[in-house]
């Protein structure tokens, strides 16, 4: 990618309107000072003293964070949180994010707020060290009335958006935002607006999704297509190409240290290698940074390779942010891709 194309693509970001439909989480970090360790008088167990608590949107909220870091003009979060303390924190964090319009984000007493509680040990001169997480999830099916509200919100926005991102973060089917009923609405949206960028990613795989733009990792591609996870790069590219041809939409596959592959329905394939890595890294949030950058770039008119270059650069930035679920700003992308150009 040349600098002029980088400018031409990213200058359109502030006029873009994107909706993110999916499972929004609260990432809550408990910062622990080990020097203040005590022993409980009552139980005799070690006490970890928390000296700071910080919270930020996670899951689909991480995609929102990355879109905001890119300077997008309008971002609609479509999802739900509980009427609980975590839901209050998540709603406040979303409302305070630049560009976010939270009017379609639902708070309900029928759901708990999906929460990742992450204790972090902070020691002078050392990188943060994460202890075992405490997660809060919903283990029962999402109420049908709530799915109908989500579908109605999507339908009301579909003519206003330049792209739609879908993210399923749940392990149990039908317990999150992207229920079968909501996915049926996505089918209808895709049929009504065939040129709309609709980019989907799912922890449980995309088998149940309509044939929109797919983004996945190698393991998810293997489950979907029957390909071996240990396949050579050439086979991964060919499998991605076949899937894109079958769906009639682009497919993107992240390959960890091997980079990222993309294929279009016309048979075009591209591979962008990962950048060399040294020192400690944290891969949490890298996939969501890829998703956000693919969606924004494609909505702004980037071609297949340009979108891959921007997404790979964003992932390279995020994995170096330790002790947090990071994001990549336009300034950081420009510095990485074009270090000789002034910021």
Image (cartoon, rainbow, N blue to C red):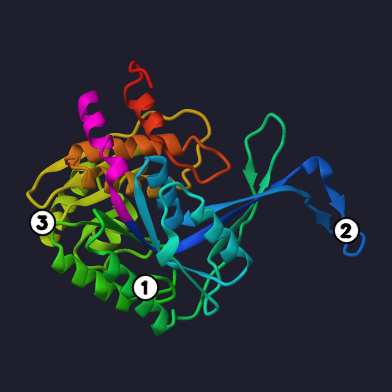
Q: Residue at x 87, y 64 (%)?
A: 43
Q: Residue 241: x percent and y percent?
A: 14, 51
Task: Say which residue label 3 marks.
Answer: 245
Give the answer, above or below, for where 288 lies relative to 248.
above
Q: Quadrant of the N terminus?
A: top left
Residue 150: mark in rendering = 1
Residue 254 visible somewhere in the drawing:
yes
Residue 40: mark in rendering = 2
CA gap, disc 1 and disc 3? 30 Å
Say which of marks 1 and 2 sits in front: 1
Q: Nearer the viewer, residue 328 or 149?
A: 149
Give the answer, above or below, for where 295 lies relative to 161.
above
Q: Residue at x 44, y 79 (%)?
A: 142
Mark 3: secondary structure:
helix
- Return the residue found at the far top: 340
Q: Residues within 10 Å of mark 3 (few under 14, many from 20)?
A: some
The total of numbered circles placed on residues is 3
Q: Earlier in the sequence, mark 3 or mark 2?
A: 2
Mark 2: secondary structure:
loop
CA gap, disc 1 and disc 2? 46 Å
Q: Residue 133: x percent and y percent?
A: 61, 57
- Return the residue found at the far left: 266
* Magenta residues (range): 1-18
> Is 146 positioned to the left or the right of 33 in the image?
left
> Is 172 positioned to the left or the right of 30 in the image?
left
Q: Residue at x 41, y 45 (%)?
A: 68
């Amino acid at each position: 990618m040349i600098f002029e194309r980088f400018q031409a693509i990213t200058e359109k970001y502030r006029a873009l309107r994107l909706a993110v439909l999916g499972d929004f989480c609260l990432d809550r970090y408990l910062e622990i000072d080990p020097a203040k360790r005590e022993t409980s008088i009552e139980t005799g167990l070690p006490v970890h003293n928390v000296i700071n608590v910080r919270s930020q949107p996670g899951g689909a909220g991480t995609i929102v964070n990355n879109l905001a870091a890119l300077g997008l003009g309008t971002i609609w979060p479509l999802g739900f949180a509980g009427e609980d303390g975590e839901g209050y924190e998540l709603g406040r964090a979303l409302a305070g994010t630049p560009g976010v319009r939270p009017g379609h984000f639902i708070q309900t007493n029928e759901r708990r707020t999906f929460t990742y509680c992450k204790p972090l040990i902070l020691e002078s001169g050392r990188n943060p060290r994460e202890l075992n997480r405490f997660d809060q999830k919903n283990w029962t099916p999402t109420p049908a009335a709530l799915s109908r509200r989500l579908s109605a919100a999507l339908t009301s926005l579909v003519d206003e958006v330049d792209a739609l991102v879908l993210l399923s973060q749940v392990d149990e089917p039908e317990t999150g935002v992207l229920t079968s009923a909501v996915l049926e609405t996505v089918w209808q949206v895709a049929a009504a607006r065939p040129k709309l960028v609709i980019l989907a990613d799912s922890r449980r795989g995309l088998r149940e999704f309509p044939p929109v733009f797919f983004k996945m990792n190698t393991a998810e591609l293997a489950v979907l297509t029957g390909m071996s996870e240990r396949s050579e790069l050439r086979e991964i590219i060919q499998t991605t190409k076949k899937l894109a041809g079958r769906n009639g939409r682009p497919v993107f596959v992240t390959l960890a240290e091997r980079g990222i592959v993309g294929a279009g329905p016309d048979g075009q394939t591209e591979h962008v290698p990962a950048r060399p890595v040294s020192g400690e890294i944290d891969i949490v949030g890298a996939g969501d940074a890829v998703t956000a950058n693919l969606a924004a770039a494609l909505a702004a008119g980037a071609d297949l390779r340009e979108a891959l270059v921007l997404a790979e650069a964003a992932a390279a930035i995020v994995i170096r942010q330790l002790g947090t679920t990071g994001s990549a700003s336009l300034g950081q992308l420009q510095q990485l891709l074009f270090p000789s150009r002034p910021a």
